[in-house]
Amino acid sequence: MFIRRCPWRSVQLHQLWRPRQIHTREPIHDKRWPGWEVVVGIEVHAQIKSRRKLFSESFTSRPGEVPNTTVSPYDAAFPGTLPTLNPKCVELAVRTALALNSEVQFRSAFDRKHYFYSDLPAGYQITQRYSPLANGGYLKLSKGNIAVGITQIQLEQDTAKSTFNGLRHTSLIDLNRAGSGLMEIVSEPDMRSPEEVADYVRTLQAVLRAVGSSDGNMEQGSFRCDVNVSVNRHGEPHGTRCEIKNLNSVRFMMVAITSEVFRHIELLESGCLVPQETRGFDEDKAETFKLRSKEDSPDYRYMPDPNLPSLLISEEYIEVIRKTMPELPDATRARLLNLGLSERDADVLMTVDSGREVGFDGELGNGAVAYFDALAQHRDPKLVVNWMTHELLGQLTARKETFSDNPVSVAQLGELMDLVQDGKITGTSGKSLLKHIITNQSSAAPSVLAQEFSLEAVSGNDTATLQTWCAEAIEALPEEAEAVRRGNPRVLNKLVGKVMQLSRGRADAQNARVVLSDILRR
Amino acid sequence: MPSVGGLARIYPPKSRASFRSRSFATSYARRSANPCADHVRSLNDSTNALVSFSTEDNPNPHGLLSSLTVAIKDNICTTALPTTCSSGMLHNFTSPFDATAVELLKAGGANIVGKANCDEFGMGSLNVNSVHGPVVNPYRTLNEELIPWAERERRSAGGSSGGSAAAVAAGMCDAALGTDTGGSVRLPASYCSITGLKPSYGLISRWGVVSFADSLDCVGVLAKSVDTVKTVFDSISSYDPKDPTAATPRIRGKAQASVEALVSALDANTSKPDLSALRIGIPQEYFPSELDITIVTAVRKVLERLMSLGAQLIPVSLPSTPYALSAYYVITSAEASSNLARYDGVQYGTRSPTLPGTDKSKPSNVYAHTRSAGFGVEVQKRILLGTYALTADAFDNYFLQAQRVRQLIKSDFDSAFRVPNAQLSSSPQNADGVDILLHPSAIRTAPPLDSDATSGLDPYLQDVMTVPASLAGLPALSVPAGSAADGWPVGISIVGQWGSDELVLRIGEIIQRTADTDDSYIIGLSTSFAPKRNRVVIYAGNMWYYTDMHENNVRMDVRYDM
């Protein structure tokens, strides 16, 4: 028997939304709404990037999957099926909790939330209403030294997707998403402007991607936000909040909050009260609209799930995860700066890195930072970042490709850099080789390619060859040679260029300059 | 209609000398691996026990269970036959998978004969809430000997596993799987004079068992002999990772080890086993005013027999028992309202077209029609009750309160038993405790169908003796214990600590084995301590017990230390 000792309380919504004194901040004076304070909290539903669903064996689906193909009898709520908790989902949620400085609970439990809707085959959603996976915590925003409090993190099931076909007056249901794991991350009402909210969302997305728990993609629906907004005059207690549901981009979210703030101020200034409501957002009109009032809010008849025993998490388990946690964005940035990279280079690497594909079940994808780290193992970090940002990313960008399309392996680029560094090929040859590898998706070793194209640098001792090229250059450009002889050193570069052309990049430019000067001064 | 001649073979001449022969135990049981399907069907005409019949060949005819024919309650999923749960909602539903218990039976080579009638989704105590119609108890009393079997008195087979019990009792199969949420195996076993085991919660996988109330649902086994029950139970009681409430091998082992010594000390293979090591508790709360006095008489006979073999009878009190029934109906209805929310006619099952003019923009409007048409009256009643119990306003007073009562009931049991509950991490041995509890399985004998007893609140009362063990998840076995004044069978229930199913089965075997030789002599029975009229006094161990009978009120209590 897995009867729990009645830990459930009737949690009312207002208890989940408790303004806490410790989070009061210095008043912020915003030119857009002088005299008013804006208070925002967010509930984020982030899809867990697990291979399988939260309680069933079936695979999670990717966007664009053929509808109703990743569905087990459990997902379709067939009679006689029972849930089995996927430990990978727990692991990823614990990673997230640790990354958000949240306290993982040794004992958490699952509850059922009931409502009838066509995207909910069982008639209830399994969630963690009364005893969430983790409590407390905070997320530091990227600007302004602000820490936004985290109220709780809970595991829950995603719903199916229903699409209404207006022409045929039918609803189409796709169960692919039904039963996928979600993390609900509830923030404290600690944000004071739409910009802070945007910062929170972007920072949270980066954290989730870094720990591999979610790809945090708002547009594709794997990161969904419900925003609670209230306004009050400075010095007064928080106003009545309204919840805006289903915002699917950061930009729309900022517009929605701004329009909601103005709506509240307008109501309050005309002497009305703000009614507590759940609202939607009309993207075309850029304004929110009423979905339902507090009085109409459904009774979800929460009940502890009688099938799922309490989730017990040991201290040892948490410690193992803490020790094997991927590096968080803040730490990565600090480490890169410590290696001597400029802020700009670190930013470029991290921006490119955040676009990497997040692997399933916490497998860390190969992003730009991992690529950099592998290259910088025995090499000068600054040199590595130069090759990566200027040459590799430069050439990929020129081809309108991203880092995820990069065909150059760490070994290839490493060898290429070493060949140049050791003077075995010239920098110019190195760049051409890189271009060749990218264009032809070649997997050949750069040293082999250098030989194949006779790109080995002419060694410093082989002066005879260099002499010949220089003589040929002077012969080919008599006017420029004459100008140098007359004491115009800037024209020398043209002759050096000719030597490089004749040698197909194999000559060392510095040596060529010396030899040319020698000949022309005679 | 079966011929009278055929029936004579099935129901041999009754003899007062042997109780067992009256229970059809040895009559029709040719143990054929391929029972004559026509014969089974003809028996079914008068019982309505089976609702679909297997036509498949046994894929594993040489397994350990290949000599057994087994019926499966219709709320347990099978791929070969429909799984209707006796509901209009799943009228044409066939599951895409076999329940784990069915899979294990098939792997053992058992011959599945068909699916057994039951109360809709297991909700009921009399097997009258069924889209397939009520099950008729196959039992025929001594007084009806001269009447053809098919024209016997029509009484309920009990519920909700009434079809499973009736199929076994009528000889249509050797064993049957049932489910027991609050007595649904034990009650029909008692009414039909067979043996029914509700194992400890979590021992048999619930994967493929259509949920009524997950926290209480158990797969149970019904058969004529304890021996057959044990054979089937042993082959399906194993850990299944697909059931999140399944007891782990570690905890099973722990529970088993705690009663191992006692089990091996009790030899069931002799007609006079030595039971001096056994402490039997008689829970005083299990003799409520509604209990039929002649049932007490029958149960007392069994107790006396066990005493004569050396068992100690100890009166115990389980003070929270009177609240069990209310708590049970709140919890099971709440869970049922949740579990049955899935039947909306969208993914599977029956779907009724909406009435013209229905606003289809709300899914609930579309569902409402299907759910009103598909669910029977009793199921609808319980869904409504459960839905109410879970609303924000009622949750504390009903659902949470019921959970508290459930906790009290569990601690009542834990403090009564000698061995600690293996599921609790640390609980001390209780030297004064008992090994098992014995009590009547039901407050009455099978009620006649079409009588008042099958409507109103009466059916709910049927479960009063059986729900406490369900709430506590304990193993409980009902075995036949003679008959009451009306000539209909009485069952006695053996309840053990969680995981002591082997002990419970062993006691059941002893009760069954010694049943034939019991009528002779009772050690320790005395009427000398009966200063009052209507007082029966029993001496056992070093204690005197008396049973007072005031009209319908019967209580057993300890009074005198010697």
Image (cartoon, grey):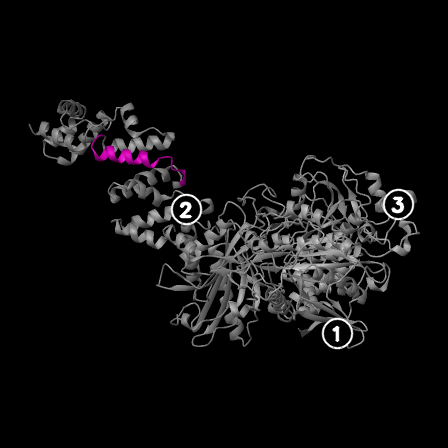
Residue B162, percent from left and from top: 77, 53
Dot 2 alpha-carbon crowd within 10 angstroms: few under 14, some 14 to 19, many 20 or more = some
Asked if badge 3 and badge 2 are on a common chain, one would say no
Q: Chain of mark 3?
A: B
Residue under numbered circle 1: B529
Task: Categorize mark 1 by other alpha carbons within 10 Å: few (<14), some (14-19), many (20+).
Answer: some
Seen in the picture, residue B560 relative to A424 is either above or below; the reply is below
Chain letter of the residue beneath label 2 in the structure image? A
Q: Quadrant of residue A420?
A: top left
Q: Nearer the viewer, residue B354 or A263?
A: B354
Looking at the picture, do discs 3 and 1 lie on one chain?
yes
Residue A355 is marked as 2
Tell me the kind of residue under disc 2.
Answer: Gly
Q: Is residue B233 visible?
A: yes
For label 3, the residue is B7
Label 3: state its secondary structure: helix
Amino acid identity at mark 1: Phe
